[in-house]
Amino acid sequence: MKVLKNVGLIIGSIISFLIIWNMASNALYKRAVSTTITKIEKLQSKEAAEETRKRIESGDPSSQPNSLPSPLLVWKTAGLLLDDAHKVMKKKQDFYKKMEKTNAKLKQAGKESITYTGRPSFLDQTITSLKNIFWGVLLAISIAIPVGILMGLSKRFKTSINWFVQIFKPISPVVWFLLVQMIVNTIMTDPDSDNAFVITFISVGLCAMWATLVNTSVGVSSVDESYLNVSKVLRLGIGKKIFKVVLPASIPLIFTGLRITVSVAWMVLIAVEWLSQSPGLGGFVREEFQNGSSSSNAKIMVAMFVIGIIGVILDKLMASVQGLVSFENKSQSPSPLSIMRNMFISKKAA
Amino acid sequence: MPYLELKNVSKSFGADSEKIEVLKDINLSVEKGEFLAIVGFSGSGKSTLINLINGLIFPDSGEILVDGKKVTGPGPDRGIIFQNYSLLPWLTVYQNIQLAVDEIFPHLSKSEKEEHIKTYIEMVNLTPALEKKPAELSGGMKQRVSVARALAINPEILLMDEPLSALDALTRGTLQDEIVQIWDKDRKTALLITNDVDEGIIMADRIIPLKPGPKATLGKEFKIDFERPRIMTSINKNPEFKKLRNEIIEYLIEIGSERRVNDQVNYELPNLKPIMPKRFNWKRKKVTEKV
């Protein structure tokens, strides 16, 4: 009953959001139309203005002024983008089918096969973005967790490196991007190399790793005294102490950090892709922004929603993984992953 | 030669001005195979004493000898049972004990280790809970795991830091019996720290009260020579038991009040009257406005 009530509340708020959005887009559309017409009247003539009004009213898409798109238009555009993705995918498949023999021959001769270089669809861009964030987060983890452990274990190391963390933590993604670009473009001079991808994932990783770094060091340095006493009493070696006692005890905090890292990485990724001319959702938004056609605004809105939804999915995914590895949250509601695990275990037991 | 010996051990905490001397001139000797209980008020430095013997902290002066050798840190010759169980919550019952066994007996084969671990889990009657995590166990079961872990490393002396004080009275009774039974099998040295006089009488051969801190010292000792096994229900009716128990409790109250008398300081209170906030009178304000 309570669930139904909550679902009702959510649906209600979604509907009111759509109504407000629709009203706002109508008002802005009218304003854009009147601005266009008065401008033409001023610069050209009354006749030209009248003609423009007629053309806009006829609904010709090429003559519509660019303003906030309505929910319906965004929905339709999303459909168009999906259709387009299907078309592009089909084209790609056809291309590879055609090239099958040639590529096989090239492979036999030890040469590189020919790849499809056509226009990427919206779906391809999304996948590219997911790839970028995967490598970015992987980089963040592989730096932040070891350094965080060291900072938590050794007071001396923490004192000597803390100034660095404090200064570099609040730096904006734009600046990180510029810094990384300076270095990467100097090192990778080969025109065939994918500089944009490398710059993107490194900037994202460096930007997003701080939450994990700080949380890991706090988690490691605040391990319950009684667990440390156990390791002392058993005289565990340093490696066993870290992997059997310290790390498992700090996993809840490490994962809280990782969750923040993933959401920051996703947020930053779009901006960095825009700047680095990399393909991906950020690149898609940039292209549509510079394109400025009548459907651009709607496409940007579609990208916005996709970005938001993927952000939510990533966060939920991290939360489920956290629930799976953490020993703490017995009282919390079970995550989808833990339910699956329990089902698996009970099946095995039966 | 006593197995465990403390000679003029003192320990204080804190920096110079806020230095608190917790233990002062502790002298103690425990024979091999003896079960000693140290009874004291909470906050009297009991845990400090056991951490010193265990080697987690070191004395400021004096020395602690185990089997004639000076204590330089924790070691497998001393098994400890902590009051808060100190089980690792991400490991199962089996894995918690395995961690200890792997460390202390690295030369044993895998199947030997498994057998060893299972023997000790069986000893504390926890075989059905083998694969459970500490969060799924009751307090008594957790402490049983802790007992099994301490015994599994085959220590020469078993140190117990208020092992049962977090448990309810019924569970405490059964666990007292179980620990004594296990101890009775090979009669190794045992040191129990407790705040419960009855627990000391039921379990130990000798009780020494710890005078309350700061500057805690050991009081006079009480020999307990009731025949084992001591059964709570029958020993309760024994007039000897009642007498001894009253004697120890009276002694504890005496040393407790002594300390309080010594600590009493007369504070001079300043002659002040509290300022009470006055009620805000809206009506009066209106009247003055009219005027």
Image: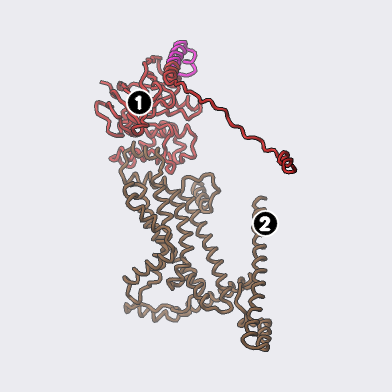
Chain colours: A brown, B red
Q: Give the magenta part as a residue range.
A: B229-251
User: Is residue B254 within the magenta segment?
Assistant: no
Chain assignment, label 1: B
Discs 1 and 2 lie in a common subunit:
no
* Chain on which label 2 sits: A
Q: Residue at x 48, y 45 (%)?
A: A328
Residue hosting label 1: B23
Q: Position of residue B48 (x, y in %)?
A: 37, 29
Q: Secondary structure at mark 2?
A: helix
Q: Is residue A294 left or right of residue A92?
A: right
Displayed quadrant of residue B100: top left
Q: Which residue is mark 2?
A: A8
Total numbered badges shown on the rendered structure: 2
Residue farthest to the front?
Answer: B291
- Mark 2 neighbour class, 10 Å CA radius: few under 14, some 14 to 19, many 20 or more: few
- Above or below, comparing residue B23 to residue A128 in the picture: above
Percent x, y of residue B260: 44, 20
Q: Amino acid at mark 2?
A: Gly
Q: Is residue B25 above or below residue B72?
A: above
How crowded pointer 1 is (Cα within 10 Å; few <14, some 14-19, many 20+) is rated as many
Question: Viewer-proximal residue, A270 or B183?
Answer: A270
Determine whether A345 is above or below A55 in the image: above
Residue shown at 25%/20% (left/top)? B1
Query: Predominant secondary structure in magenta?
Result: helix
**Residue B71 x, y percent position in the rendering:** 27, 30
Which numbered dot is residue A53? none
> Does the magenta-highlighted stretch encompass residue B239?
yes
Mark 1 vs mark 2: in front = 1
Q: Label 1 sits on what residue type?
A: Leu
Residue A89 visible somewhere in the drawing: no
